[in-house]
């Protein structure tokens, strides 16, 4: 075991050097000897300190002792093996998932989700880097839960909270009572794909259609037999949209900024920041995203880097149709004193199919 050391200062009317020489002759530890005006500094151990205290009066000396490592409680703490363990143990604990919570409105949904989480190994005492990503977990949960519209995740330290969001209830009577129909084009475009639940294709892939053209029929014919099943589903197509806009030159927006990781330590002896934090949580690991409100002035040269992405987001949020913007072409942009106006050509891919009731005879 390492012996405790002390810093000793000898001063006074006597001769400090004589006492140091006597320590050396009696084989007491003396190291790091320094001589200053009227005093001598050196290091010794407990045996040397006892010898100094028993002989200082004989040499008429004043003794000032400072144990190495003395200072604030924090300094003493971090110079010990206990401090090292207090740092290593919380760090190792932060690598594991300690708690999984399901915050659901209905207990039966929460129970089913907990079972799925266990099957996918999202359980306590699992290494965080071995957990599936959020998209995989969300897909696993929503596959067999048609009542859910989305699943949110909140991660605070080593605790993961799963929050399933239930879709608003809609009446299905209108769907049942609705007459079967065909699918026709809501707008013109070039067909890129079909996702039909029922009915039969009439249009073809890569075919150019106009508004009102028949895309899929709900009347199936086989020989002399005719079956009216109704066409249901989606038909996707590409088309160019001329988008005219007018924006104020100075705009405010919120953008997801950089993700910050905040680590709070709960070390005995230090002031606690969180009053309600459990005593066994040595470390709290929180993630924050900067989403403060920002102001920017639109200027020439910002068309591609800022203006076009802004208009894309605005266009996608204006309608409820499922759509994707595949390309764009800036036709004209004008910067005035207080406004920015112009026209952009967007290549959009979306579902263009709408229901058209069948005629009484079943013809198109």
Image: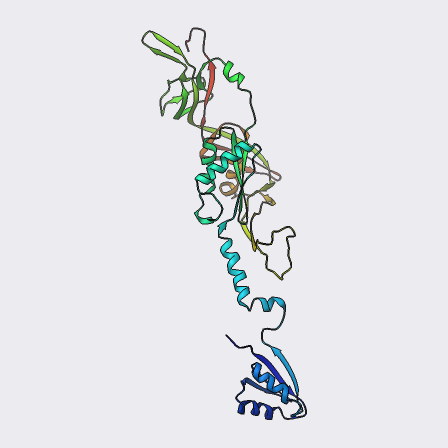
In the depicted structure, whether residue 126 falls above or below residue 8:
above
Whether residue 347 sits left or right of residue 87 in the image: it is: left
Q: Position of residue 182 (x, y in %)?
A: 43, 15
For the point 48% across and 12% down, the residue is 179
For the point 57% across and 86% down, the residue is 34
Q: Quadrant of the C terminus?
A: top left
Q: Position of residue 13 (x, y in %)?
A: 68, 92
In the depicted structure, whether residue 177 falls above or below residue 51:
above
Residue 26 visible: yes
- Seen as rendered, the residue at the extreme left is 223
Q: Position of residue 211 (x, y in %)?
A: 45, 19
Residue 333 visible: no
Q: Quadrant of residue 80?
A: bottom right
User: How was the colour assigned to the protein in this rendering?
Assistant: rainbow
Which is more toward the observer, 349 or 341? 349
In the depicted structure, whether residue 242 falls above or below residue 251:
above
Which is more toward the observer, 26 or 281? 26
Q: Position of residue 140 (x, y in %)?
A: 45, 36
* Count of numbered circles in the view: 0
In the depicted structure, whether residue 296 falls above or below residue 201:
below
Which is more toward the observer, 116 or 318? 116
């Amino acid at each position: 075991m390492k012996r405790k050391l002390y810093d000793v200062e000898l001063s006074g009317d006597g001769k400090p050097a004589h006492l140091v020489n006597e320590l050396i002759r009696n084989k007491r530890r003396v190291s790091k000897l320094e001589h200053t005006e009227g005093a001598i500094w050196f290091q010794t151990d407990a045996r040397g300190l006892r010898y100094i205290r028993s002989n200082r009066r004989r040499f008429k000396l004043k003794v000032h002792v400072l144990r190495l490592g003395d200072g604030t409680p924090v300094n003493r703490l971090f110079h010990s093996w206990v401090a090292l363990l207090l740092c290593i143990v919380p760090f190792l604990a932060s690598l594991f998932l300690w708690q999984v919570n399901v915050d659901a409105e209905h207990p039966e949904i929460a129970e089913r989700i907990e079972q799925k989480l266990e099957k996918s190994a999202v359980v306590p005492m699992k290494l965080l880097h071995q957990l599936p990503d959020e998209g995989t977990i969300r897909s696993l949960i929503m596959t067999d839960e048609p009542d859910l519209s989305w699943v949110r995740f909140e991660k605070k330290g080593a605790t993961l909270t799963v929050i399933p969001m239930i879709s608003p209830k809609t009446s299905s009577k209108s769907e049942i009572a609705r007459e079967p129909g065909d699918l026709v084009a809501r707008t013109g475009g070039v067909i890129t794909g079909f996702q039909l639940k029922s009915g039969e294709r009439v249009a073809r892939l890569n075919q150019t259609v106009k508004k009102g053209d028949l895309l899929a029929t709900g009347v199936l014919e086989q020989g002399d037999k005719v079956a009216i099943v109704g066409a249901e589903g989606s038909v996707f197509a590409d088309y160019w949209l001329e988008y005219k806009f007018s924006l104020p030159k100075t705009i405010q927006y919120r953008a997801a900024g950089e993700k910050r990781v905040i680590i709070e330590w709960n070390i005995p002896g230090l002031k606690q920041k969180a009053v309600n934090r459990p005593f066994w949580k040595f470390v709290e690991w929180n993630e924050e995203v900067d989403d403060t409100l920002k102001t920017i002035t639109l200027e020439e040269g910002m068309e591609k880097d800022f203006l076009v992405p802004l208009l894309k987001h605005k266009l996608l949020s204006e309608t409820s149709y499922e759509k994707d913007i595949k390309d764009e072409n800036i036709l004209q942009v004008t910067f005035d004193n207080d406004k920015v106006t112009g026209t952009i050509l967007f290549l959009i891919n979306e579902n263009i199919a709408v229901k058209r009731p069948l005629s009484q005879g079943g013809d198109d």
